[in-house]
Image (cartoon, rainbow, N blue to C red):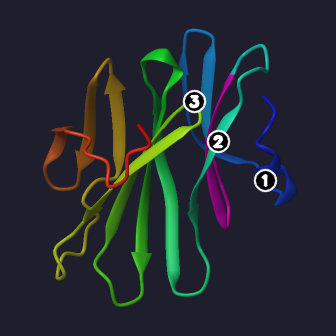
Amino acid sequence: MPRPSDAARFSVSDVTAADLRGTRAAAVLSDIYSYAYAIDVDRRGLVSVLAGASEGDSDQHALGLALGTGGALWSLTTAEHAGDPLQTVVNHLDGRCRDYEVLTAAPEAEVYPAIDLAVDGRAVYVVVPGTGIATFEFMPARSCR
């Protein structure tokens, strides 16, 4: 499957996660930059999001993704910024509409709030270290709808 143009330009080609729903495929490509993208198996309908960048005092890694109903792309990124609590960013990309929610760990916590996700219809689930799988009510910090 073709990569998003930015991923190709920066030679990002390591697939670290994948999902398939019907005729739609999705993947996370990771290197210094992480991209989550989805495309139809006939190579149409490519959508992508820069899901993370690890530069300087920042370390971000897209760990998981899921295809939702209607081809919506969900991805999960863990983020560490010098001096700040650990974060998990859940991205939702539906067509050209991207919204996201940032989960922030307690200042003294040494684990990310979530490390993977799954989607079933309207239900979103996250993997919470030390807890297991939990339901997740997506409440975007910024909504494009």
Tell me which numbered mark, 2 or 1, is placed earlier along the sequence.
1
Q: CA distance from mark 3 to mark 1?
A: 18 Å
Q: Residue at x 28, y 78 (%)?
A: 85
| Rendered location of residue 93, percent (x, y) | 51, 37
Residue 3 x/y as whole percent: 78, 40
Report the quarter where the N terminus lies: top right
Name the residue rendered at 56%, 9% in the picture. 22
| Observer-nearest of 106 and 97 | 97
What residue sits right under mark 2 in the picture? 48
Q: Say what secondary structure mark 1 lies in.
A: helix
- Range of residues picked out in magenta: 28-39
How many C-alpha atoms fall within 10 Å of the one at disc 2: few (<14), some, or many (≥20)? many
Q: Are marks 2 and 1 in contact (CB under 8 Å)?
A: yes
Categorize mark 1 by other alpha carbons within 10 Å: few (<14), some (14-19), many (20+).
some
| Disc 2 residue type (three-letter) | Ser
Q: Earlier in the sequence, mark 3 or mark 1?
A: 1
Q: Nearer the viewer, residue 123 or 59?
A: 123
- Is 42 placed above or below 84 here? above
**Separation of residues labelled 2 and 3 (CA atoms):** 9 Å
Is residue 2 or residue 102 the one in the foreground?
102
Task: Label 2, secondary structure: give it.
Answer: strand
Q: Is residue 111 magenta?
A: no
Looking at the image, is 67 positioned above or below residue 143?
A: above
Residue lying at 63% horizontally and 10% vertically, measured from the top left: 23
The amino acid type of the residue labelled 3 equals: Gly
Disc sitting over residue 6 in the figure: 1
The answer to which of 141 and 5 lies nearer the viewer is 141
The residue that disc 3 covers is 95
Question: SS of the residue at dot 3?
Answer: loop
Q: Nearer the viewer, mark 3 or mark 1?
A: 3
